[in-house]
Amino acid sequence: MSKGTVVLAYSGGLDTSCILVWLKEEGYDVITYLANIGQDEDFEAARKKAESLGAKKVFIEDLRAEFVEDFIWPAVQANAVYEDRYLMGTAVARPCIGRRQVEIARREGAQFVSHGATGKGNDQIRFELTCYALYPEVKIIAPWRIPEFYNRFRGRIDLMEYAQSHAPDDLYLMTKNPEDSPSTPDLLEIEFKNGVPVKVTNVKEGKSKDSPLDIFSYLNEIGGKHGVGRIDIVENRFIGMKSRGIYETPGGTILLQAHLDIETFTMDKEVRRIKQGLSIRFSELVYNGFWYSPECDFVRHCIAKSQENVEGKVQLSVFKGHVYILGRESPKSLYNEELVSMDVQGDYDPCDASGFIRINAVRLREHHRLQGFSSTKQ
Amino acid sequence: MSKGTVVLAYSGGLDTSCILVWLKEEGYDVITYLANIGQDEDFEAARKKAESLGAKKVFIEDLRAEFVEDFIWPAVQANAVYEDRYLMGTAVARPCIGRRQVEIARREGAQFVSHGATGKGNDQIRFELTCYALYPEVKIIAPWRIPEFYNRFRGRIDLMEYAQSHAPDDLYLMTKNPEDSPSTPDLLEIEFKNGVPVKVTNVKEGKSKDSPLDIFSYLNEIGGKHGVGRIDIVENRFIGMKSRGIYETPGGTILLQAHLDIETFTMDKEVRRIKQGLSIRFSELVYNGFWYSPECDFVRHCIAKSQENVEGKVQLSVFKGHVYILGRESPKSLYNEELVSMDVQGDYDPCDASGFIRINAVRLREHHRLQGFSSTKQ
Amino acid sequence: MSKGTVVLAYSGGLDTSCILVWLKEEGYDVITYLANIGQDEDFEAARKKAESLGAKKVFIEDLRAEFVEDFIWPAVQANAVYEDRYLMGTAVARPCIGRRQVEIARREGAQFVSHGATGKGNDQIRFELTCYALYPEVKIIAPWRIPEFYNRFRGRIDLMEYAQSHAPDDLYLMTKNPEDSPSTPDLLEIEFKNGVPVKVTNVKEGKSKDSPLDIFSYLNEIGGKHGVGRIDIVENRFIGMKSRGIYETPGGTILLQAHLDIETFTMDKEVRRIKQGLSIRFSELVYNGFWYSPECDFVRHCIAKSQENVEGKVQLSVFKGHVYILGRESPKSLYNEELVSMDVQGDYDPCDASGFIRINAVRLREHHRLQGFSSTKQ
Amino acid sequence: MSKGTVVLAYSGGLDTSCILVWLKEEGYDVITYLANIGQDEDFEAARKKAESLGAKKVFIEDLRAEFVEDFIWPAVQANAVYEDRYLMGTAVARPCIGRRQVEIARREGAQFVSHGATGKGNDQIRFELTCYALYPEVKIIAPWRIPEFYNRFRGRIDLMEYAQSHAPDDLYLMTKNPEDSPSTPDLLEIEFKNGVPVKVTNVKEGKSKDSPLDIFSYLNEIGGKHGVGRIDIVENRFIGMKSRGIYETPGGTILLQAHLDIETFTMDKEVRRIKQGLSIRFSELVYNGFWYSPECDFVRHCIAKSQENVEGKVQLSVFKGHVYILGRESPKSLYNEELVSMDVQGDYDPCDASGFIRINAVRLREHHRLQGFSSTKQ
């Protein structure tokens, strides 16, 4: 008799295959679920493998468009960066993958979900918080945290994966080594509306893309070709360990630079300061797995509000691992060439600056003068 | 009869020369002061020019070492960046220049100081707040905010400066165009102690530098050679205008990347989060001209405290406009390879992660379950 | 020939009467405008006085309802408090008064507005930023900053006002001395919806109010009767001076306590933390006069969003200068008596707390263990 | 044979007595430890009870002075308040109690510590994080999270404790009901140095106290006599549940008001803003149990730095549940009566305010004017 049905997030790789087999041994019916978020994978091979290992049903879901629109675009609006450097490709993917998994579990009447994330990482948290938030009564089976499983399998999987992971050419899948990248730049123009890209044009080639998925894929392609977005960092995991990470985010890096530029061009200075604080919070929430939480909903809403006037075009060049902003234009620009010009007086009276400075100095002068001073009574 | 003595921040250029002549016409004795903070300048020619235009005294002060140690190093500790992109070379220089000017004014018994900063910019504020903070009773003469001056001189100076400023090759003085930069990287190792660099080594050449000024100059040289640190941005001035700025900060860009790396490696996660907030404040304060203020003193103190364990070595490569971090090592590292390893269990029990996640989910599940729920009374 | 038309914010008192006369002497047509925001004033006497002093037109505007709904209610949603203590009655009134003044100026074709605020205070800033924000081309005449005016009038007005201001009984206009207040409390129940009060009931008397203006007036009455909301503080003005202020905010104090209570009862913990930061910003913006600014619009929008579920009833007692919260109930409560009970296990497994704590301790234990430890390389 | 030695935080009450007996049954040697932090307790009776129940050793430790100096004083410097209302008496006591417990465990060679905190509360976390931080290899036995224990004892303890907890008069132990409190106020003067009280004087009685413990005890006494510091709140526990708490903090409430006052009087405005943010962090850290953490060390250091000039005397009255600030004086006051006076011009030129306001309006006017405006290119 079955213990119930598990929807397993299946990768087609060795470790989730072991999990599939083990879950069956333990007496569960197993439905495998493989999300296509744009990774390079032979999905049909994975389907056959799952079926041959005894999966009761196999779901292969194309989430590419919703991943870009519902998850990457809000991260672009936020300029989401964790600890000043990490662009969080993985962190943003987890809630997208988990959301569909929970939908399948509900639809198929499965009380359990399972995944192959390890017991020391962030992904287990991102995955499980998504599940609990969207399906509070779900039971989660995390084999890498179950001694019966990991004591039995760890050694063998380690051995197999050792070979793969020690093949350095595989480390970067999307980006070329900048030293081997083309010696002429690509020039792009990215158009934004409400803080998200609506069109990208390769200026020299005249080619353009305008669906979210096409835009993002094209930026990944161009960024990858020029070796953009590689980082080697040490980061702080949610559970409090430091870990080393090597990441590549070619399209995300181009978008971050372009969005920062158009945002500063069109957003009020003080709104920008407040939004910057919200963005740091957003990044921490997403990194820690709280995409589906009341606070992340709230922050996303506030950030989206801030983007209402973030529109216009940014021109940039991509070359040898770096993105260079060349210019920008916008119907909502707050840049006023006349106001800032040294040659045009206009409405601005430079004498006002004297008063501004002197009032700002009131406090500084008091501080200086009263240091070590006598008593006042109030 | 003299109206008093003015210490004028003199650049040797046309506009401060006009100011010098005008101040004399207005009846002041003028002492010129030219700070050497590392710019490319013929200081002796400037001295002769000042003397020939009637300066009563001429001070040319070599501030290069104190600029690096007292101003750039704290900015490195802070990872100081304004509005996510601007490294604030100029903003950091003003309080350094102003401090010495005020010292000269006090020593020479001058009641006035003057400068050539325009009436719409940030530099007037940075300069004057420094003066008011350190010499509260000083009187400031800002000719570009005085109608008698600017109505008379603006046209002529504009004409002269037009030629210079429209010579695009001059725009970047320190950095090569990345497209023309060497096609082999330089490999550097930077050693930090208390969050500031104490040594830089060119790994291939075996060459190293270990005084603050030498380190910073060398990083400017290497960064410049590889076209690192060029940006074209729109920024928000303190006075509320947006302006376009084109900047180059080759050494600063290398140091920012290296310091971010060693800091994350050695600093506790939560200390880092708090320090990140203080760094943003610090950057705003410095940009706005408040280096000498009680709050900036306070923030600098706090940031310096956070740097006590920020030590170790960062290896990086500089190539075609980009800085790549290659690795890091530190006696104060909080990175624990064994703890984070998937193969070593050690003290860490993966089952704890289940509890951690489930407790984090308590709130999320409540939120989900109680949405649209009945009344409770307390 | 007239220099143009000025709309003067007129109080009926000596100083704005002097301003009225002086503006006419200076050649302006003067329209006086007196806002009724609930102060105790003989408005008809003020009208006659203005007319007799030569006002071309006199506007007396009842802004009481819009003051409560458009200005006080958002401050209640924000828990607006400046520097931990000041509830900002005055700061919130200025943009309300200024908004109507600008409307009148536009309607009457006046190019000028004027006011009687002094040159060292906050009110001049609040008033003028409101005018500039809503009527950018307006010209502002601030007589207390014009030497011709203040050198002539200061002495005489000082003399007259000395008598009034040194009559201590007048200091508090709305609140009784708590020592003289009733020795039995009033019990109130305040009902909130979207974070603003929609009804107040005096529990013992059975009396209730449900329009915004009636609610606020009634809370002022009850709070005043019991001496609630008096403070004697030193505060930091926007211009950087410290000043002493003695304030009374009876209704506002009751609402702050009640709103804090219902908010914590119905708002997610982490949303609350983010909203707390926004509230501090909001308070600073309002205090400094930036009610009408893009950033204050943005913050108000975000705060309003956070209030969507802030509804329910708070029971409280008002007695001898203090407000005591007695209980609360809400259809949107996130308080779950069963979950928190020590007697009910339910879904919550206490063992999870062990894992939660141990994971939170990972970082602390590392910190302790690695203090003074050996080198790691990555 | 013993399983080892446990140091048990013992209260003398029923539940920790049960734990003591159960630990012995389970095969441990038990050392009981009872901290005196000022609570009303018959310590000798507790000692006898522990001995009679089989404790191997009994430690009764007077921590009152170190509790005030090392824990309450930093909280006073911080104006520590959780969620705008809770003064955290308990949260501050836990690290004090835990620190000594760990010292005893190390000294006595005990590998285990134990406590009677429940599995849903904050205290378990505060207690255990303290232990892990200071004694990383310690093993913690939390019986209320161990099914064998709580399934056996819960019912019986509940029964016994029901009677006690449902005796409403016991709810408040330190404070009188304000309705029954004296009808004449006590007038106090509290003197601060480095942000902590160094003396309290009862102005009418002429009586004063000047050791930390005496000061704090006296303020508890006076506050208690007048019914100060009672609150009934719903709060958010660290584990994400909302719980209702009824607290009394008479001395802490007086100190908070007095410290807020002297701090604003002597601290620069902008330092205060930054410190306010740090204080909120500090409060959250302490509430959540992270007193002994690198980030709390860091924040405490920063806050202590901010207090260097926080000195002077505050006069206040305590009456019917409320604290009224009456005045303050300080040798380090930044309040400058002359500067703020409307009658004294001095160094301050009111015309500067015009420039200050107009520059602050630049951005607001741009925002207004450019709304819906045409394209700019940069």
Image: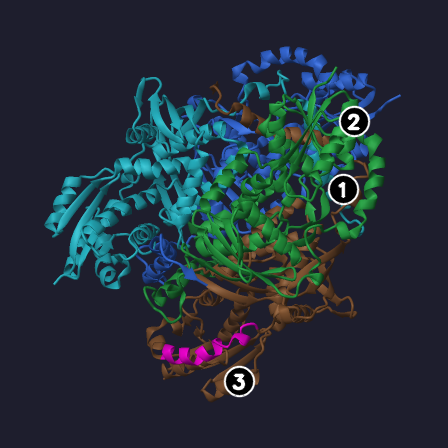
Chain colours: A brown, B green, C blue, D cyan
Q: Chain of mark 1?
A: A
Q: Give the CA distance from mark 3 to mark 2.
A: 84 Å
Residue situated furthest right in the rendering: C1
Q: Secondary structure at mark 3?
A: helix
Q: Are marks 3 and 1 in contact (CB under 8 Å)?
A: no
- The residue that mark 1 highlights is A340
Residue B289 x, y percent position in the rendering: 62, 37
Q: Label 3 is placed on what type of residue?
A: Arg
Residue situated furthest left in the rendering: D52
Crowd around label 2: few <14 · some 14–19 · many ≥20 (10 Å): some
Residue drawn at (74%, 50%) of the image: B171
What range is drawn magenta here? A153-172
Q: Quadrant of residue D307?
A: top left
Q: Secondary structure at mark 2?
A: helix
Left or right of D174: which side holds B226? right
Which numbered circle lies on residue A47? 3
Residue A309 x, y percent position in the rendering: 71, 53
Residue D135 x, y percent position in the rendering: 28, 53
Q: Label 2 is placed on what type of residue?
A: Trp
C56 lies above or below B341: above
Residues at marks 3 and 2 on the same chain: no
Left or right of A309: which side holds A28? left
Which numbered circle lies on residue B22? 2
Q: Label 1 is placed on what type of residue?
A: Val
Q: Give the CA distance from mark 1 to mark 2.
A: 25 Å
The label nearer to you, 3 versus 1, is 1
Q: Is residue A161 magenta?
A: yes
The label nearer to you, 3 versus 2, is 2
